[in-house]
Image: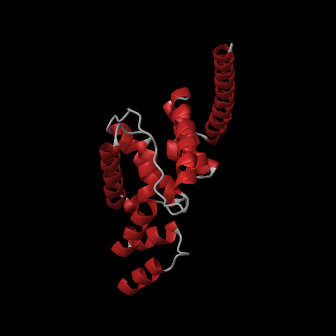
Amino acid sequence: MRADAQGLSGNAATTDEQLAAAAKTGSTAAFDQLVERYRDRLLRFLLGRCGNRADAEDAIQDTFVNAYRYLQSYDSRWRFSTWLYRIAIRNAARQALHTTAEPIELADHADPLASCIAQSDRQNLWLFAKRQLSADAYTALWLRYAEDLALADVASALDRSLTWTKVSLMRSRRRLAAAVRQEAVIAERSEMYGKV
């Protein structure tokens, strides 16, 4: 089995589900690769739900410990990412981490100025969304658009129906669009009054 696990971990095309199956049979190398794949994504996700980086890192550690502990309960008919995010959501809720923190971009970029500008715009948008939406609606929006999960996977991660997920996303987009338009009108009026 050791050779099989190393073969899996060396293959970049190996799916999460294949790695989870190998980890279920005892391959720590396969589980290590899953941790590597999801560590940064979970950190960005949990920073939006936790009070600070330390709390987010604690939640990540708890998520991976619980994932390893309950790996035998993972059902390969579902995406591994959905199962893992569900564990992360439950850990964050259990710890009652409700303070806001800015999500941070962890990838390196060639142009630091362009990266900072793009990161600032993304952070402002996600912070704006967090102020405007309920926790569940914000989480659904994040999982769908920041993590690019399929609608069914978002619904499963949140333990909601597919219909709720679709409606929540539609209402969230509409609410955000209206709030952005309102902010633009306010900003325009402020500029007009400042110039007079």
Q: Position of residue 37 (x, y in %)?
A: 46, 64
Q: Position of residue 70 (x, y in %)?
A: 35, 58
Q: Where is residue 21 in the image (x, y as percent from the top left)?
A: 45, 70
In the rendered view, does 186 fall on the left or right side of 110?
right
**Residue at image x 37%, y 69%?**
32
**Residue at image x 52%, y 76%?**
12
Viewer can see residue 157: yes
Front position in the image: 10 or 65: 10
Quarter of the image for the N terminus: give it.
bottom left
Front position in the image: 73 or 122: 122
In the rendered view, does 102 fall on the left or right side of 179?
left
Q: In this view, does 16 lie above or below 97?
A: below
Q: In which quarter of the image is residue 91?
A: top left
Q: In this view, does 194 lie above or below 114?
A: above
Viewer can see residue 24: no
Q: In which quarter of the image is residue 192?
A: top right
Residue extending farthest to the bottom is: 3
